[in-house]
Image (spheres, rainbow, N blue to C red):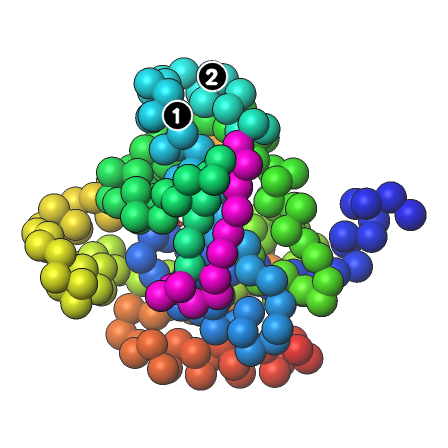
């Protein structure tokens, strides 16, 4: 049996949706609950965006950005948001990855088919027994179309910007709600309108609108869907 066929027997739950919708919370919870691995695909785009930025390569040169991907030694450590760390070539880049600027750059490089192709196999390599919970924009449509459960989380841009603003305030980081809202809208527009793997629910995805739900209500809904999928 080749590696692809072996990998395909390992179940995947795909969780897609726009930035700030709570995919991180849901996928961490699912991974812990099921004892499965977790892929934060956005982190891979952020890592590549940061590496390109540090090498002085802008998003207007997607082939040069994509060429950096195979050479990056990436290590994910920890399991909860508090103890997670990302090392690239042995260097801790966790804080730099979380910056809004890195997210914006990631969204720009992610529009290029060459960049998406360079990261495709790297994402599929996370599929290991007993299962994988994959967090992203195109997990259910492109990367793992055979996922056993596909969730698409959505929420109004204002609600997502407000959640982000509250999170930053908790960490004593000053941010303008108006600027955050503008960033969220710009990123949404880019992620939804690109031709390569745009942000859209898979035809067989369950769409959950979390705009007026608390975190606990979102998790209750996910738990119910998990039960309906026999997981
Ligand atoms: O999930 P995130 O905010 O860390 O992702 C950063 C950017 O990466 C996002 O704006 C779009 C891009 N991305 C993508 O195009 N496809 C994915 N599967 C994950 C992220």
Labelled pair 1, 2 in contact (Cβ < 8 Å)? yes
Ligand 1 lies in quarter? top left
Q: Is residue 26 visible?
A: yes
Q: Is residue 34 left or right of residue 198?
A: right
Say above or below: 67 vs 74: above
Task: Please identify the residue farthest to the front as the structure is shown.
Answer: 90
Dot 2 corresponds to which residue?
64
The one nearer the camera, 105 or 140, is: 105
Mark sitting earlier along the chain (1/2): 1
State the residue at coordinates (79%, 59%). Answer: 9
Residue 94 x, y percent position in the rendering:
36, 48
Magenta stretch, main secondary structure class = loop
State the residue at coordinates (43%, 67%). Answer: 80
Residue 194 x, y percent position in the rendering:
42, 33
- Specify the quadrant of the image occupied by residue 218: bottom left
Residue stretch in magenta = 72-83
State the residue at coordinates (49%, 17%). Answer: 63
Residue 216 x, y percent position in the rendering:
36, 82
Dot 1 corresponds to which residue?
52
Which structural element holds mark 2?
helix
Which structural element holds mark 1?
helix
The one nearer the camera, 174 or 177, is: 174
Say above or below: 67 vs 124: above
Pick the quarter of the image with the C terminus: bottom right
């Amino acid at each position: 049996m080749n590696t692809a066929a072996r990998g395909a027997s390992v179940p995947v739950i795909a969780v897609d949706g726009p930035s700030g919708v709570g995919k991180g919370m849901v996928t961490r919870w699912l991974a812990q609950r099921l004892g499965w691995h977790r892929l934060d695909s956005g982190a891979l785009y952020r890592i590549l965006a940061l590496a390109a930025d540090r090498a002085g390569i802008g998003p207007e040169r997607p082939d040069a950005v994509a060429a950096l991907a195979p050479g990056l030694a990436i290590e994910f450590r920890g399991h909860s948001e508090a103890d997670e760390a990302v090392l690239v070539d042995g260097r801790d880049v966790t804080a730099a990855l979380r910056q809004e600027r890195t997210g914006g750059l990631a969204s720009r490089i992610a529009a290029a088919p060459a960049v998406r192709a360079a990261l495709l196999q790297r994402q599929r390599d996370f599929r290991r027994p007993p299962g994988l919970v994959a967090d992203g924009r195109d997990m259910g449509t492109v990367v793992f179309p055979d996922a056993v459960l596909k969730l698409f989380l959505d929420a109004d841009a204002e609600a997502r910007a407000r959640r982000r603003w509250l999170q930053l305030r908790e960490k004593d980081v000053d941010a303008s709600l108006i600027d955050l809202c503008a960033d969220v809208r710009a990123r949404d527009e880019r992620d939804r309108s690109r031709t390569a793997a745009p942000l859209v629910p898979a035809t067989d995805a369950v769409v959950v609108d979390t705009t007026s739900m608390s975190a606990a209500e979102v998790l209750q809904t996910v738990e119910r869907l998990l039960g309906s999928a026999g997981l």
